[in-house]
C-alpha cells in the first residue's frame, strides 16, 4: 500500500519556514554569497557601465568567488571594492513588508558616486533561502575599511 505523500515545491517549503527566517530589520548586515545583478527590466543606461571601452552589466553585489575571478582576470573592477576576501556586505536601510532595501557597504565611496548613486538592492526571503545572502552576526568593520 502506497502512502499518499504531498509534493513540496520550493514556494511551499518557503511558506512553511517563513517564521524561522530572520525578520528584516533596519541596520542588519547581510553577506553576499552569490552575486546579485540588476533586474533586466532596469533601463540599459542605468544597469550598464563602460569601463576600458567595454560595456557590461554592473554587479550590485559580488560574492567572494566572483571577486577571485576578477583578480585572476586582472580586471579593473577589482578597484571597485574595499575588500576582496569576502562577499559584499549589504546593510538594510528600509524594510518593506517581507523585503528589505539595502545598500552595498563594500563598494568604495568614489565608485558609488560614479556608478551606483541611488542604487538599492532589494532582498526577499528567497535570497536567504536559496543561499544568495546570509545574515552576519559579527563585526564587519575590518572588512569594509
Image (cartoon, rainbow, N blue to C red):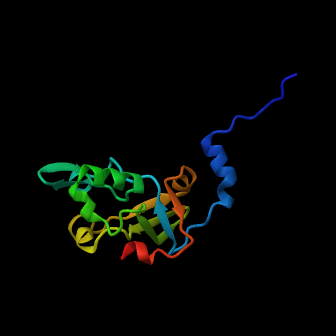
Q: Position of residue 96 (x, y in %)?
A: 50, 66
Which residue is situated farthest in the top direction here?
Answer: 1
Image point (65%, 44%), residue name: 12
- The quarter of the rendered structure image containing the N terminus is top right
Q: Position of residue 66 (x, y in %)?
A: 36, 52
Residue 101 in sight: yes
Q: Is residue 6 left or right of residue 131?
A: right
Q: Position of residue 90 (x, y in %)?
A: 43, 67
Q: Is residue 124 left or right of residue 115?
A: right
Q: Is residue 136 left or right of residue 89?
A: right
- The quarter of the rendered structure image containing the C terminus is bottom left
Which residue is more in the foreground, 23 or 73? 73
Query: Quadrant location of residue 121?
Result: bottom left
Residue 42 in sight: no
Whether residue 139 is situated above or below residue 77 in the rendered picture: below
Image point (23%, 54%), residue name: 75
Which residue is situated farthest in the right direction here?
Answer: 1
Whether residue 86 is situated above or below residue 39 in the rendered picture: below
Image point (37%, 65%), residue name: 120
Image point (43%, 67%), residue name: 89
Which residue is situated farthest in the front direction here?
Answer: 72
Whether residue 37 is situated above or below residue 88 in the rendered picture: above
Which residue is situated farthest in the left direction here?
Answer: 53
Q: Position of residue 62 (x, y in %)?
A: 37, 57
Give the total number of marks visible in the rendering: 0
Amino acid at each position: 500500500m502506497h502512502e499518499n505523500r504531498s509534493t513540496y515545491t520550493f514556494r511551499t517549503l518557503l511558506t512553511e519556514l517563513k517564521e524561522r527566517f530572520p525578520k528584516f530589520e533596519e541596520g542588519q548586515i547581510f553577506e553576499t554569497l552569490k552575486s546579485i545583478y540588476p533586474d533586466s527590466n532596469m533601463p540599459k543606461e542605468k544597469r550598464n557601465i563602460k569601463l576600458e571601452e567595454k560595456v557590461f552589466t554592473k554587479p550590485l553585489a559580488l560574492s567572494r568567488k566572483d571577486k577571485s575571478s576578477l583578480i585572476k582576470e586582472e580586471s579593473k573592477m577589482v578597484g571597485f571594492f574595499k575588500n576582496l576576501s569576502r562577499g559584499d556586505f549589504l546593510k538594510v536601510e528600509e524594510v518593506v513588508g517581507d523585503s528589505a532595501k539595502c545598500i552595498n557597504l563594500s563598494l568604495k565611496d568614489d565608485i558609488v558616486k560614479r556608478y551606483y548613486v541611488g542604487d538599492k538592492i532589494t532582498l526577499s526571503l528567497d535570497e536567504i533561502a536559496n543561499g544568495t545572502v546570509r545574515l552576519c552576526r559579527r563585526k564587519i568593520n575590518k572588512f569594509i575599511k
